[in-house]
Amino acid sequence: MACHSSLTPESSPLSSSKLIPFTRYNPNVPQIVTSFKGYQKLMYQGYRYNIYQVLPERNFKSWRCVCAKKMSDSGAWCKCRAETNMADQCAHNHPPSIL
């Protein structure tokens, strides 16, 4: 017996109108992404940041390096922060994790 699908290209769930265009990662452009757990993360210059503080009245978000609670090879936690203006506040004590 032959199997026939009732889906036509126009009614397919993967029709071109529903596809999201692919954008290549550029480490010099700050990007806010959603983690698998639903949290916001900032990616900038190969480093990843977790949201740390939100002050909606000032339109301010403070971000903390994901290695802030992990010991690096040097034996110290990373103390780097970023703000919504995307200015890195210090020098990281570990190499970027290029994705």
Image: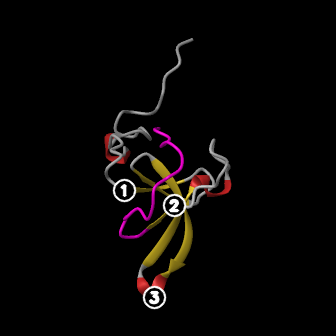
Is 75 on the left-hand or right-hand side of 18?
right
Q: Is residue 33 above or below residue 60?
A: above
Residue 94 within the segment the image draws in magenta: yes
Q: Which tag, 2 or 3, sits closer to the chain's start?
A: 3
Instruction: Please identify the residue farthest to the top as the structure is shown.
Output: 1
**Which residues are drawn in magenta?**
83-99
Residue at 60 percent of width and 50 percent of height? 36
Residue 53 location in percent, x, y?
55, 74
**Spatial CA span between label 1 and label 3:** 22 Å
Residue 43 within the segment the image draws in magenta: no
Q: Is residue 75 above or below residue 82?
A: above
Please identify, in this view, whether the residue under mark 2 or under mark 1 is nearer the observer.
2
**In terms of depth relative to the viewer, which is nearer, 34 or 80?**
80
- For residue 80, the mark is 2
Q: Crowding at label 1, few (<14), some or many (≥20) Cα neighbours within 10 Å?
A: some
Q: For numbered disc 3, what is the local secondary structure? A: helix
Q: For numbered disc 1, what is the local secondary structure? A: loop
Residue at 58 percent of width and 56 percent of height? 78
Q: For numbered disc 2, what is the local secondary structure? A: loop
- For residue 57, the mark is 3
* Residue type indicated by callout 3: Glu
* Residue type indicated by callout 1: Pro
**Spatial CA span between label 2 and label 1:** 16 Å
Residue at 46 percent of width and 38 percent of height? 98
Q: Is residue 25 above or below residue 57?
A: above
The answer to whether the residue labelled 1 contacts the one labelled 3, judged by CB atoms less than 8 Å apart, is: no
> Residue at label 1?
30
Instruction: Please identify the residue farthest to the bottom as the structure is shown.
Output: 57
**Spatial CA span between label 2 and label 3:** 24 Å
